[in-house]
Image: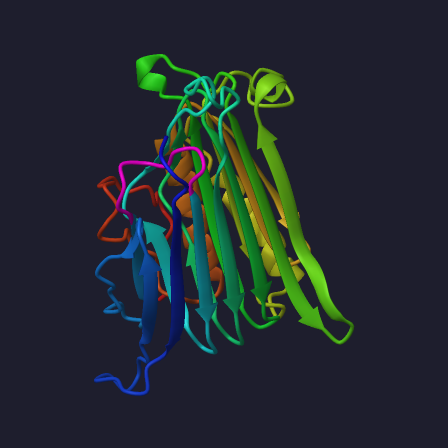
């Protein structure tokens, strides 16, 4: 039996003290990784100096017992997007071993420290949980009131093309976002989910649909509620022409969107459109596909960057 594998990735993001363009201050990075995690070539050649960080899981997939830890320290005035190089696979664990028929959990923990006037986006490619796979992810974010955090989760439960379902597997997720104020640390947003058993079949769950996705955006405190309300209307309009069931709602300082259906492409397209709208609201550059992403289609519809 394979021994437990604990992979780590520690990232520090900070403003460069030098730039060839006086109008653009680039975000640069420092990284320290242990296998199977590895940071691939990083780019920061965008017009706004945003740093693109692709993280590679160098093994063929995640098996029961594997532990992954990602720590990101986004320092003051840094702007970055972090993604995975490829869709991640979680292999089946239950019923695979006579010594441990109940299987072993794989776990990924992310700790993000996002400091003053920073903008961090966590947009990994989708996770595919094989039949009998056990996977839990825990994300903790400490966000400065002046900063922004956007994250996307997209998971396929079972290998649909092989007519496989999740079966007795389980996918769990925990997202906790904190902010500091005069009274100390307080919750900005908390979200806990488990997809397994009856939740996969129920009309209040996935109704046998294999794809689940979520997008969460927490804004800087200075964003006005009127602007967020207008954004919500636009996000809902962007569902047009896409397959699946999509909902979007307001948070105290942000928005939360959900997708259930059969198409990871439709989920990605809708989330991309929402992502674009968040950039436009803040008068930032239009998002572009990272070089590592395989999608070639244009999901933007009529969404345009402000002149």
Residue 271 falls inside the magenta stretch:
no
Q: In the image, is residue 195 above or below residue 237?
A: above
Residue 64 falls inside the magenta stretch:
yes
Residue 16, quarter of the rendered image: bottom left
Observer able to see residue 50: no
Q: In the image, is residue 183 above or below residue 88?
A: below
For the magenta stretch, what is the residue range? 57-66
Rendered location of residue 5, percent (x, y): 38, 45
Q: In the image, is 185 to the left or to the right of 115?
A: right
Residue 112 or residue 268, whichever sits in front: 112
Residue 206, quarter of the rendered image: top right
Residue 4, quarter of the rendered image: top left
Rendered location of residue 242, percent (x, y): 41, 30
Q: Residue furthest top?
A: 163
Rendered location of residue 222, percent (x, y): 61, 70
Residue sitting at x 39%, y 36%: 127
Residue sitting at x 24%, y 83%: 21
């Amino acid at each position: 039996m394979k021994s437990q594998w604990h992979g780590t990735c520690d990232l520090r993001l900070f403003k460069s003290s030098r730039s060839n363009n006086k109008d653009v201050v680039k975000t640069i990075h420092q990284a320290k990784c242990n296998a199977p995690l590895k940071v691939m070539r990083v780019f920061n050649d965008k017009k706004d100096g945003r740093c693109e960080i692709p993280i590679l899981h160098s093994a063929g997939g995640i098996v029961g017992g594997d532990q992954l830890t990602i720590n990101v320290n986004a320092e003051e005035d840094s702007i970055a997007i972090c993604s995975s190089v490829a869709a991640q696979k979680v292999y089946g664990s239950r019923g695979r071993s006579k010594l441990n028929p109940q299987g072993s959990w794989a776990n990924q923990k992310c700790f993000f420290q996002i400091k003053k006037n920073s903008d961090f986006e966590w947009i990994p490619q989708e996770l595919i949980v094989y039949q009998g796979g056990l996977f839990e992810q825990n994300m903790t974010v400490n966000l400065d009131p002046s900063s922004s955090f956007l994250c996307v989760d997209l998971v396929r439960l079972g290998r649909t093309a092989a007519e496989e379902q999740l079966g007795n597997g389980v996918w769990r997720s925990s997202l906790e976002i904190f902010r500091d104020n005069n009274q100390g640390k307080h919750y900005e947003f908390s979200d806990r989910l488990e997809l397994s058993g009856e939740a996969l079949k129920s009309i209040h769950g996935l109704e046998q649909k294999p794809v689940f996705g979520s997008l969460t955006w927490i804004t800087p405190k200075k964003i006005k509620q009127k602007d967020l309300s207008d954004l919500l209307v636009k996000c809902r309009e962007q569902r047009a022409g896409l397959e699946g069931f999509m909902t979007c709602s307001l948070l105290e300082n942000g928005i939360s969107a959900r997708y259930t259906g059969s198409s990871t492409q439709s989920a990605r397209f809708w989330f991309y459109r929402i992502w674009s709208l968040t950039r436009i609201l803040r008068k930032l550059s239009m998002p572009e596909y990272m070089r590592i992403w395989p999608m070639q289609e244009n999901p933007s519809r009529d969404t345009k960057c402000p002149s």
